[in-house]
Image: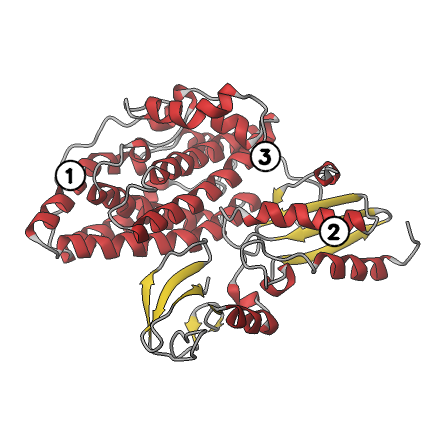
């Protein structure tokens, strides 16, 4: 007997139970889509570490962090999908590369462990500031997703900070690799804090107070991350910014192969459940 | 369907729903965890509100299915389980009974906090021998909600349910 037939709906909603299910407007959905794609792409990259990390505890740690991010992606994509009558799976598995709105930092290949830690340091700091601000959004659903995510990404930042110090203050060799990791990641920092067309579109139609202006988050990032890097005996890279464009569907060559792997099963068996 | 006042039915539904356990920590019910938030009954229509522990915790899907199964076997056909994110779940909602059951199961319960910030514990107590002489092995464990510890007295490893 299949009891799941009795489930009429399972809305993720910040509203009280008496209210009807929340539906995002097109403009809010476009904004949520970008945030959801960021979380989804980074979650997939972290999942690639499982069975490959330097020690078992890190397999578990990076897997756990990825799982939290996947949870954020599910909430955000589910919410975005309410505007277009598409499910989280439709959005994750049945869009092509140019339809993804993730910032380019998140699709970077993992590189070595130090490079992943460098990306985690930058990503986690960004997420902490983003979700702290988004938890005050006038959109109740986005605020609820953000308030929950904030608690989790704070824990992720702690993880990357500890490894930054261990590797930076470890041996000459670990220091060198941590520095190289920062060098690879650094050109992608600027894009994180550059304009989000979907956020600007919301503001333009008078829905200000819903999206977070990421440009305003940069001072908090600059106040923390360079200090952590220096405290770990490392140097803050001075490098020109990469081209950017993730929010308008421009991606590096790394995203396509990643999506091919992520989507192949769902596309080979459309509609399958497991 | 039996005809009862909504309040009585809500109580019955709550009691049924609260028998559902966490599939990963089977000594804890969803009521012990603070995951079961609210039950509303309108005629024959039942709505159950639950909240996830962690955003990505896959156990929430199993709990949702189990609630529907339990209620369906008791004759409730029109059941909606709604996942609610706000306010965000915290281990401060875990019941005293739940904390005792966790320790008996071999998992150190989460530290108590005031307003979710200030820890009131002296340290993490080994659920096997009761010693406070313990060490964190990894902040991430077998599930999202746990960290891995080792007792330096009895030398046994154990899980800690993280304060969250």
Q: Residues within 10 Å of mark 2 (few under 14, many from 20)?
A: some
Kindly identify which residue carries mark 2.
Answer: B70
Which SS class for mark 2?
helix
Quadrant the N terminus of chain A occupies: top right
**Comparing labels 2 and 3, the label whose residue is closer to the camera:** 2
Query: Could you tell which of marks 3 and 1 lies nearer the N-terminus?
Result: 3
The subunit letter for the residue under badge 1 reads A
Residue in front for this viewpoint, A51 or A137: A51
Marks 3, 1: nearer the viewer: 1
Mark 1 lies on residue: A183
Disc 3 is attached to a residue of which chain?
A: A
* Residue A24 badge: 3
Residues marked 2 and 1 touching at CB (< 8 Å): no
Tell me the CA gap for discs 2 and 1.
Answer: 55 Å
For label 1, the SS is helix
Question: What's the CA distance linking mark 2 and mark 3?
Answer: 32 Å
Residue B146 locus on image (x, y percent): 44, 59
Q: Name the residue: 85% across, 62% down.
A: B8
Mark toward the viewer: 2 or 1: 2
Quarter residue B141 falls in: bottom left
The verdict on a common chain for dots 2 and 3 is no
Q: Residue furthest right?
A: B3
Q: Residue at x 56, y 44 (%)?
A: A141
Decide if residue B159 is on the left or right side of residue A3. Answer: left
Horizontal and vertical percent position of residue B122: 39, 80
Q: Nearer the viewer, residue A192 or B114?
A: B114
The CA span between labels 3 and 1 is 39 Å
Residue B78 lies left or right of residue B129; in this view the side is right
């Amino acid at each position: 007997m299949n009891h799941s037939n009795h489930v009429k709906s399972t809305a993720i909603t910040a509203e009280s139970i008496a209210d009807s299910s929340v539906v995002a407007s097109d403009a809010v959905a476009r904004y949520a889509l970008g945030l959801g794609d960021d979380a989804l792409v980074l979650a997939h990259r972290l999942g690639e570490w499982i069975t490959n990390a330097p020690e078992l505890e890190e397999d578990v740690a990076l897997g756990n962090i990825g799982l939290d991010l996947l949870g954020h992606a599910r909430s955000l994509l589910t919410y975005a999908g309410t505007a277009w009558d598409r499910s989280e799976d439709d959005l994750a598995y049945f869009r092509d590369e140019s339809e993804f709105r993730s910032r380019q930092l998140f699709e970077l290949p993992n590189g070595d462990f130090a490079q992943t830690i460098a990306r985690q340091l930058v990503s986690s700091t960004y997420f902490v500031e983003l979700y702290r601000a988004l938890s005050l959004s006038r959109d109740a659903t986005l605020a609820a997703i953000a308030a929950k995510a904030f608690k989790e990404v704070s824990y992720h930042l702690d993880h990357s900070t500890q490894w930054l110090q261990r590797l930076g203050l470890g041996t000459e060799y670990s220091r060198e690799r941590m520095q190289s990791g920062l060098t690879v990641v650094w050109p992608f920092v600027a894009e994180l804090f550059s304009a989000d067309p979907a956020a600007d579109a919301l503001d333009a139609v008078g829905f200000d107070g819903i999206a977070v202006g990421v440009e305003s988050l940069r001072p908090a990032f600059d106040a923390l991350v360079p200090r952590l890097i220096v405290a770990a005996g490392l140097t803050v890279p001075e490098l020109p910014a990469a081209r950017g464009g993730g929010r308008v569907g421009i991606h590096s060559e790394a995203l396509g192969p990643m999506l091919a792997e992520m989507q192949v099963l769902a596309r080979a068996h459309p509609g399958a459940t497991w | 369907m039996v005809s009862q006042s909504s309040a009585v039915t809500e109580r019955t539904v709550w009691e049924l729903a609260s028998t559902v356990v966490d599939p990963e920590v089977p000594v804890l019910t969803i009521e012990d965890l603070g995951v079961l938030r609210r039950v509303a009954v309108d005629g024959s229509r039942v709505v159950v509100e639950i909240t996830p522990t962690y955003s990505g915790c896959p156990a929430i899907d199993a709990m949702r299915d189990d609630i529907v199964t339990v209620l369906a076997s008791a004759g409730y056909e029109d059941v909606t389980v709604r996942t609610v994110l706000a306010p965000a779940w915290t281990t401060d909602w875990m019941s005293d009974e739940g904390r005792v059951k966790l320790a008996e199961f071999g998992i150190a319960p989460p530290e108590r906090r005031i307003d979710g910030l200030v820890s009131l514990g002296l340290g993490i107590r080994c659920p096997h021998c009761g010693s406070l002489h313990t060490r964190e092995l990894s902040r991430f464990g077998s599930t999202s909600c746990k960290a891995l510890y080792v007792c330096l007295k009895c030398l046994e490893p154990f899980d800690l349910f993280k304060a969250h």
